[in-house]
Image: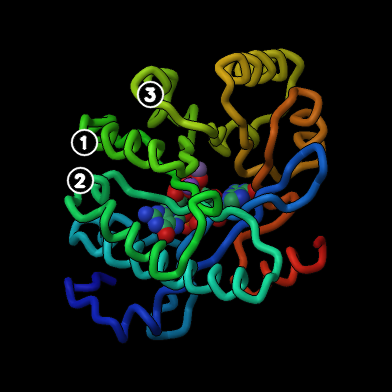
Amino acid sequence: HALNGKLTEARLNKEFVPYIQPKIDLSSEQIVGGEILMRWINEKGELIPLTNFFFSLNEKGDIYLIDLYLFDQVCHWMNQRLKAKQPLVPVSFNITNTSFFDINFLDDYLNILHQYEIPKEYIEFEFLEDIQYGLNEQVIETIEKLKAIGFTCSLDDFGSGYSSYNVLLKTQVDIIKLDRMFFQKQLTEKYAKMLNYTILALKEMNLKILAEGVETKEYVDFLKSAGCDYVQGFYYYKPMPLDEFQQLIDKQA
Ligand code: G
Ligand code: G
Ligand code: NA
Ligand code: MN
């Protein structure tokens, strides 16, 4: 399913769709944000999750173009919501490490934000430590620039092995996204203690904490008592098209 480096505007338009997964504030149980997750609709009309084709995209550098295209689409949507004075919440975008290496990265993203007049408070960037490159100087530098401009930055998949406490020493982030593997285990007494201390340690560092991939009420209740700030997971919502998402935020407004 390689794109063969022949990524045209027409193909982008037809085949790549931004989905969004709601983020829930645990104290209010309101939707306070959303993460953009791309979906590919192939020639047969099948919806394909990114994990199934991500590596072939990345090799060809196509991910940068697709991410930028999705960013444009979503900012356009946000602009329309803002202009019509409709409810809106901050939206997060995944940035692959190879995109940080692109010399045009900041300019390209900032141009789109200016074009659609999106306040920086509405934009969050998610990144993770790269398996191959670690967290190299260029990535750290770009994250510092994003932070200085005023964007929220979050560290994705914390605890998965790709991102660890070591990253927290190298760069400043606002939000830690606890990897979903944490919440797919049985919640034993011993394990609950370990999770409690992990959350406590991160809070001591003034970080906001989001639990990913939460699927059960047991974990929601536990995370509330542990002082976790946000949850994202099938227990509340799966990733969905933007029009479904806007109905949800309209309803809670
Ligand atoms: O939603 P899904 O399970 O397919 O996501 C798989 C992985 O792909 C996730 O780790 C996520 O961080 C990454 N991902 C999802 N959407 C995007 C996107 O639009 N751009 C980039 N760069 N990564 C994404
Ligand atoms: O790496 P990243 O955390 O960005 O990947 C997010 C991926 O996790 C998305 O592909 C999304 O579909 C998936 N996801 C989100 N919530 C859940 C959940 O509750 N359970 C499972 N198994 N996957 C989830
Ligand atoms: Na992510
Ligand atoms: Mn994640």
Q: Are marks 2 and 3 in contact (CB under 8 Å)?
A: no
Describe residue 26's horizontal placement relative to residue 119 as left or right.
right
Residue that appears at 42% across and 27% down: 172
Disc marking residue 101: 2
- Whole-angstrom CA distance, mark 2 to mark 3, is 18 Å
Residue 159: percent from left, percent from top: 49, 27
Residue name at image x 38 percent, y 85 percent: 43
Q: Can the viewer see residue 234 in this picture?
A: yes
User: Gap in Å between the C-alphas at discs 2 and 1?
Assistant: 7 Å
Identify the disc placed on residue 167: 3
Q: In this view, does 169 lie above or below 115?
A: above
In what quadrant of the picture does the N terminus appear? bottom left
Residue 211 in picture, x, y percent from top left: 63, 36
Dot 1: element: helix
Question: Dots 2 and 1: beta carbons under 8 Å?
Answer: yes
In screen coordinates, is 49 left or right of 195?
A: left
Please rate how many residues cluster around mark 1, counting C-alpha atoms within 10 Å: few if below 14, some from 14 to 19, many from 20: some
Q: Which amino acid does label 2 sit on?
A: Phe
The foreground one among 165 and 45 is 165
Q: How crowded is mark 2: few (under 14 residues within 10 Å), some or many (20 or more)?
A: some
**Numbered tag placed on residue 138 in the rendering:** 1
Quarter holding the C terminus is bottom right
- Kindly identify the amino acid type of the residue bearing the numbered disc 1: Gln
Q: Nearer the viewer, mark 3 or mark 1?
A: 1
Q: Where is residue 204 in the image (x, y as percent from the top left)?
A: 61, 14
In this rendering, is residue 245 above or below 27? below
Q: Which of marks 3 and 1 is nearer the N terminus?
A: 1
Q: Visible in this render: residue 51?
A: no
Side of 205 where 137 appears, left or right = left
